[in-house]
Amino acid sequence: MDVLIYTMEGCPFCEQAKCLLVRNGIEFSEKVAPPGSATWQEMKEKTRGATLPQVVIDGEPIGGYADLVNQEATGELHKRLKIAHGEELLYDVVIVGAGPAGLSAAIYAIRKMLRTVIISKDVGGQVGWTNEVENYLGFSQVNAGELVAKFDDHVKRFGVEKVVGVEVTSIDLAKRIKRVYTGDGKCYLGKTLIIATGGRHKPINIPGERELVGKGLSYCSTCDAPLFEGAEVAVIGGGNSGLEAVLDLMQIAEKIYLVSMLPLQGDAVYQEKIRQSEKVEILTEHIPLKVLGEKGVLGIEVQSLKTGDLRVLPVEGVFVEIGILPNSGVFIDTLATNGKGEILVDTECRTGLAGVFACGDVTNVPYKQVVVAVGEGAKAALSAYNYLLNLK
């Protein structure tokens, strides 16, 4: 495969085009073509272009710098040149996960002209478990599904390659080239890896829970508490997640039932504030049995572990706040994690393993919010880009 680039000294676009080719491991020959020179006339005849640079592959002109960037971003350049590592394509960045963090990372990676692929079992992540988002900058209120669609459309505009509907089953991160294996038997090779697999809410696994998600049942008080102004609600969970949810709701709801199987486990300062509120009724040593309602939450049935008595709480909303589990299982034996299984990262989303970055809810970064995940995804992509710039 013969790659020729016509350039001119002092042309910044020519330098950028050559850097792009070098970064992708593409060998090329160069002809300096000052305007008006014989080489410039030759270039015009071959490419029908008069601006610099001009790139020619096997005698076929593909255009200037902007055209080169577009073909690299969409993967057309790699297909044309059959750039591969063994039988598998070598990517600059492999992103695992297509929630807010992963999609944000993809946009920043592709804008840095990095050959990028997203691998995920679904698109949207935990956002799909809520109904409305009211705390995302630029939207006073937006349907969660619509927000995910906007994220996905943004990624599609850049032509990012996506592999959706498969799960990552194993990884090999020991060498410079990272290997990601999926359940359909394929292997994806990357110079860098960004882990954005997110987390999953711990469910209470009772009748009505799954059916009423987004219809009065929520896993995020920060996201959905404003929807229950003046209402009666129940919070399930006696740890910090549950207590923080109650504190959020005390400013909004008319009455809050705090249901916990154990005595309250959260911080003492949270407990004191809650116990002082006339709005809160604390039901420790109680378990939820069933969420009532069809089109929306009409109540929740709970049972006392001491007496066995049943009680129906007449609530319009139920907040399940018993914690989040990070989706880190595939990586937990390879990367450093904390006691919760969250991948440990520094301020640049580095995991401690060269070329491997992590972002969003799968990490130990606090505050599991969409806007935080989006920012962390951007950081991870920029960190991966800087890593690639410094590869020798």
Image (spheres, rainbow, N blue to C red):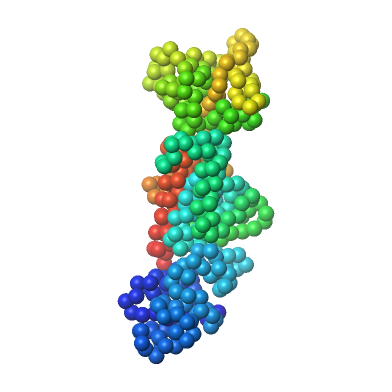
Q: Is residue 15 above or below residue 207?
A: below
Residue at the outermost left position: 10
Residue at 64% of width from left, 30% of height from top?
A: 211
Picture layout, residue 13 above or below residue 286: below
Q: Nearer the viewer, residue 127 or 200?
A: 127
Classify residue 8 as left or right of residue 213: left
* Left or right placement of residue 315 versus residue 29 in this view: right
Is there any visible trace of residue 169 in the rendered image? no
**Where's the C terminus, which quadrant?**
bottom left
Q: Residue at x 63, y 12 (%)?
A: 310
State the residue at coordinates (57%, 32%).
214
Q: Quadrant of the N terminus?
A: bottom right
Relative image position of residue 189 (x, y in whole percent): 56, 61
111 versus 96 height, above or below = below
Q: Is residue 306 visible?
A: yes
Q: Tell me if 358 is positioned left or right of 8 in this view.
A: right
- Residue 60 x, y percent position in the rendering: 54, 80
Residue drawn at the location 45% of the way across and 80% of the way down: 49
Of residues 203 and 209, the one drawn nearer to the viewer in this rendering = 209
Residue 276 placement (x, y as % from top left): 40, 13
| Residue in the foreground of this view, choosing between 181 and 211 | 211
* Residue 188 screen position, x and y as percent: 58, 59
Q: Name, please, the residue furthest toward the bottom.
A: 38
Picture mark count: 0
